[in-house]
Image: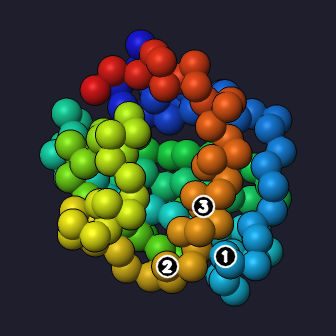
Amino acid sequence: MARFLSPAWAAAVNAALDGVALPAPGPEAGLAAQDGRFAVAQEVAGTPDGDVRLVLTADAGTLSMAVGPADAPAADDGAGVPVVVTLSLAYDDAAALSRGELTPAEALTAGRIRVRGDLSVLAAAQGMLAAAREHTRAVDADTTY
């Protein structure tokens, strides 16, 4: 079982998504995500491994995740895909979002997530994550928090 937001968890998510083609972003995604190539960073405070930075990269209809230390470079995902929006939140809130106990809208409204960058990209990322969900259900079931 992989622990949520650990490198092993990110590897399991990537394995589940390997070869899966996801829909392109819709018109609501905004200019930064129109070409389907963007990255979203999550800075998560207080994980069992300390503060971490998760980067979700969309590129040519595929998604991948990488987890590293919070002080990782913020300009891109390491492969030249620009990080256009960054979310900052506590580990408990990230876990609640992952388990479906908290919706993104509830977290934003309650001020439990801070957002920097192009908010329109979140629409594209959410749409792609929703489409990927069926492929990652087994990872979800095996994730520990």
Question: Alpha-carbon distance for marks 1 and 3?
Answer: 8 Å
Amino acid bearing label 3: Ala
- Out of 113 and 62, give the one closest to the viewer: 113
Reading the image, the residue beneath label 2 is 119
Q: Is residue 143 visible?
A: yes
Q: Residues within 10 Å of mark 3 (few under 14, many from 20)?
A: many
Q: Earlier in the sequence, mark 1 or mark 3?
A: 1
Position of 62 with respect to 120 (left or right) is: right
Q: Residues within 10 Å of mark 2 (few under 14, many from 20)?
A: some
Q: Earlier in the sequence, mark 1 or mark 2?
A: 1
Above-or-below relation of 20 to 108: above
Residue 29, numbered circle:
1
For the point 49% across and 79% down, the residue is 119
Question: Alpha-carbon distance for marks 1 and 2?
Answer: 9 Å
Reading the image, the residue beneath label 3 is 125
Q: Earlier in the sequence, mark 3 or mark 2?
A: 2
Above-or-below relation of 84 to 130: below
Local SS, label 1: helix
For the point 60% across and 61% down, the residue is 125
For the point 41% across and 22% down, the residue is 143
Amino acid bearing label 2: Leu
Position of 55 with respect to 33 (left or right) is: left
